[in-house]
Image (cartoon, coloured by chain):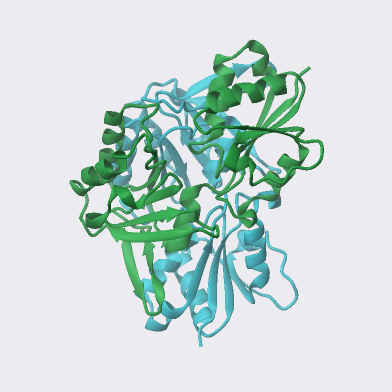
Chain colours: A green, B cyan
Amino acid sequence: MSGHLCVVGLGPGAPEQMTPEAVAALDAADELFGYGPYLDRVVLREGQVRHASDNREELSRAGAALARAAAGAKVAMVSGGDPGVFAMAAAVCEAIEAGPEDWRRVEMQVVPGVTAMLAVAARVGAPLGHDFCAINLSNNLKPWELLERRLTAAAEAGFVVALYNPVSRARPWQLGAAFDLLRGVLPGTVPVVFGRAAGRADERITIVPLAEADGGMADMATCVIIGSAATRVVERPGLAPLIYSPRSAE
Amino acid sequence: MSGHLCVVGLGPGAPEQMTPEAVAALDAADELFGYGPYLDRVVLREGQVRHASDNREELSRAGAALARAAAGAKVAMVSGGDPGVFAMAAAVCEAIEAGPEDWRRVEMQVVPGVTAMLAVAARVGAPLGHDFCAINLSNNLKPWELLERRLTAAAEAGFVVALYNPVSRARPWQLGAAFDLLRGVLPGTVPVVFGRAAGRADERITIVPLAEADGGMADMATCVIIGSAATRVVERPGLAPLIYSPRSAE
């Protein structure tokens, strides 16, 4: 017999940005897996079992959850933001493909959520208003040269770029190198938005021109949005400026 | 005196995929603006005024809403999916920049939502699991040559591509032309996901290899996700195949 694995997007962090579908999926589970700080956001009901793990252990966490689901348990895997955007859904799929045959019989569901770049964009206007890319800046799983190639291609073609996982203790220099590279392609006036913990109590939003953007302005919890040459800054009396990318952008 | 304009993301369509934040923002408004079919999803409470408009009239709709907010009204502008992704947030920002000075004094808030590509991706696995682009295929506001350049750049650099607004009555050939172009860059085996009305009662999800992808497989309500050369198809006994893009993709 086979259980069920639901990969649940918690959204950017504020409870009012989590969908009712996600709330129901968490409530329906017997066992919850996830990175500790994400699991901390969930109030368990009596009888639910919690399996917290470290943030570098996606594949083993996915395997542990699949093993429980294959044994018949109703399992939820919690994920920050949207599970499909640099989060747990791909790790679960990888584990299914590489794992034992009975993991392919597990019913798997993904519950989407508001991913970080959408929450950050909402706080400043509409920086993702025209064509854009989302890039995971972590080079734990892919070579840095590939990231350089993607950043260059995206900026040259006029995409706005949203960067996830811009820095970590083990990757201190990549974000600064990305800004250096982009300064070679884009005007220094292009606005860069650093959005940390968007929508949460400890939110911090910073906007600087690309010329002044520095890798030290971000941490692990920051999503960075780099405008295109067409992205606009609209000053407003008594209000924060609006940042938006016009729909017509060439 | 100045009112307030809140641009609200309704999510992909199912009520359980709309955030509590969006529900509260709609409830707090005196007047609601939007494209008719989106407004139809909202149950108005007594005293709320409804201003429905056609789907080609984003800028005039934004101006009408701003004028009411500048006059002191509490206004909500409804938007499908997420307002910041090819929806109303950029149109409102454009109207503010081009409009009279008092529109810049209007407090504007954006409430993010689950955008279509996330809802579609969730139904098939994790096709957006590595770096990806979102492209609005409408060339109403930008030249087709720019879209060709962006599609080529994205595919050559290994991004997964999500296409919004793939076809309309006035733009029947663009999606087919995009597939032809991409077949020149990517293997014909790359999976293409057509996701229509994801999460709603009339949902229709179709997966075909790029070699067989045809412009006629989509309509206005479809979001199309085209894998990269690294995107995987995992067959499962008795279940739909999983489509995912591995995190390590080179």
Residue B160, picture quadrant: top left
Q: Is residue B87 above or below residue B129?
A: below
x%, y% of residue B19?
64, 55
For the point 65% across and 72% down, the residue is B28
Q: Is residue B243 visible?
A: no
Q: Nearer the viewer, residue B62 or B243?
A: B243
For the point 72% across and 64% down, the residue is B43
Q: Nearer the viewer, residue B187 or B18?
A: B18
Q: Residue furthest front?
A: A169
Quadrant, the N terminus of chain A = top right
x%, y% of residue A42?
68, 45
Q: Is residue B68 visible?
A: yes
Residue B39, picture quadrant: bottom right
x%, y% of residue A139?
36, 31
For the point 43% across and 63% down, the residue is A125
For the point 68% across and 69% down, the residue is B27
Q: Is residue B124 above or below residue B100?
A: above
Q: Is residue B164 above or below residue B47?
A: above
Q: Is residue A83 left or right of residue B153?
A: right
Q: Residue furthest bottom?
A: B1
x%, y% of residue A249?
32, 56
Q: Residue furthest left?
A: A184
